[in-house]
Amino acid sequence: MLRNGWRKYLEFLGNSLYSTELLASSLAPRYKIEKEQRVAVKIGYSLYPFQQRILDRVMGDALIIGLPTGLGKTYVAGAFLARETAQYPKRILFLTPSIPLGVQQTLFARNNLGVQEAYLISGTLPPGRRKSLGVWNAGYIVTTPQTFFNDFLAEHEQEIRQAKKSEDPVSALREFMPAYKFPFDILVADECHGYIGETDGYSILLSAKACGAKILALSATPQLHAPSRLLELKRIFGQIEVFSINDPDIRSFLPERSITIVRLYVPQKLLMVYNQLAKVIRDYRERVKSAYGSQHLKGYCKKHPLCVSLLALRIMRSRIVEDGASSVLNYGIWRVRELRQSLKELGGRSIYDLYREALKSSFNHKFAATKEILKRKSFEKAIVFVESVECAKQLGTILHGVYGLEDVAVLVGKGSMSMEQQASALLQFKERARILVSTSIGEEGLDIPVADLEVWMDPPSNPKKWIQRFGRILRHSGKKKVASIYALISLMTHERRKLLSVMRRVEKVYGFTQFVREEDLARMPEKGQKEITGYL
């Protein structure tokens, strides 16, 4: 039934008003562009004081780091382009890491920057077709690094690779490619934390710098603070501006942040499976350590079947409580002998037998809790974050049964959704749906509409995930209010420890603090009732 429900949702997206197939085709040129075009950007909005201060500090080629998701990096970039094209029209290239984000940035340029002839150029338009249409002659182009690299830099790959090995790759590239001319005046590189080393994005940055194009790069990720990463980027950017969420101007702009840890009781049979898996994992650890050494216990080795099995067991044990029993239903690791053999302590049943019993009695203990929170809390827009794709599809189908297809959008990775379907789901959430169920693909980069409520079915695994999730409800709505998150934690498991550990790292890395409180689901107040609880 759940599989049929997922297919039904994808069919709905393809046939609905939110389908991006026609939209995406309309964002590419339809007729040949004969000559190079230039544009002048005119923004249709005003910057907030802290955004204007950021813009005022951008003087040359600049990298902006640490401005959290939801605080208007795109608006700052738009104002930057307006400033740079105020006297003379320019040719602008806007790099995005994905096509869904490219769709959003193209629409932003058309709707907010006054550039009606902004175009999205992607691999969905074949190279021959791109050439015959003269697409790169457009004055404002949004594209992915791979598409641009394939058309302009692939033939220079050897020279670029050689230049990257030198102490001054920009000067080396000028020497290796003296006749090369970067085809745009201004380059904006969004979500640039992946533009390091042997990547298409880094190659584009180097070539643009070598040819004298003006560059603005943006990232919300503090990982760029690592000395090795900054060293690479300092070869390109003369100016690197690092912003903290504790900046007084930024802090005054943000709503209060509140996390409610919702404690859930784990069904007894599922808890037994969780504990039995711990014993199997301990046995595998000893076998791996004995056979290959303790360095193989970290889970990075994929060479030995024994190491791979250990990693799979550890992941499954975490997922079985973090995303619920149903999320691991189709895991291949269930086939290993240790999970299929009869055990005296289980009354002759195997761990797998016990898991199937737990699944029948409680398909997913976190689904019911999520439904209850959405039922009890008042919200305009809500986002439910999960880790596993299967869990997102299952929960989405269940919520469709409660709220209808129109009111629940589901966003998962491209293995289960095409990039066009992802963009359609985001458009659905923006235009109509009140609830978005999303895997980690919704944590970073995508322009997701403002939400006033989040549910975390699983604790974020690292500070980056934490801050990206929180960024989805940090956006300013004109009112000072509390950004509310409900984190579901299974009692008597590792989840609470993991959540608080990552939170401490978030506060250390970002200087990011929040109110934290704990409640049992049974005690959570209904809509409109005052919450009385102790703060940690």
Image (spheres, rainbow, N blue to C red):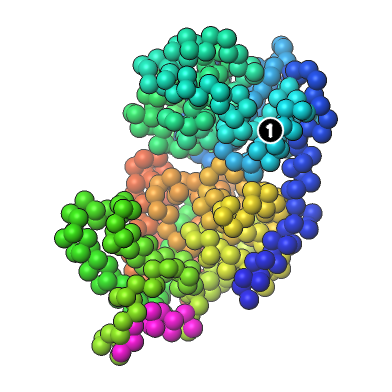
Q: Is residue 526 above or below residue 416?
A: below
User: Which of the pair 33/194 is nearer the observer?
Assistant: 33
Which residue is at a point 71% across and 11% down the rendered structure image?
87
Residue 234 among magenta residues: no
Q: Amino acid at mark 1?
A: Pro
Q: Which residues are magenta?
A: 348-360
Residue 42 in view here = no
Say left or right for 130 vs 147.
right
Q: Which quarter of the rendering shows the N terminus? A: bottom right
Count of picture labels: 1
Which residue is at a point 70% across and 58% down the rendered structure image?
433
Which residue is at a point 66% across and 22% down the rendered structure image?
92
Q: Residues within 10 Å of mark 1 (few under 14, many from 20)?
A: some
Say left or right for 212 vs 353.
right
- x, y percent for residue 239: 46, 19
Q: Is residue 441 above or below residue 134?
A: below
Q: Report the residue that reaches farthest toward the right.
A: 31
Element assignment for label 1: helix
The quarter holding residue 96 reads top right
Q: Is residue 481 above or below residue 195?
A: below
Say left or right for 107 vs 51.
right
Which residue is at a point 36% across and 67% down the rendered structure image?
317
User: Which of the pair 57/144 is nearer the observer?
Assistant: 144
Say left or right for 305 vs 471.
left
- x, y percent for residue 441: 54, 50
The quarter holding residue 335 reads bottom left
The residue indicated by pointer 1 is 127
| Majority secondary structure in the magenta region | helix
Residue 350 among magenta residues: yes
Residue 467 in view here = yes
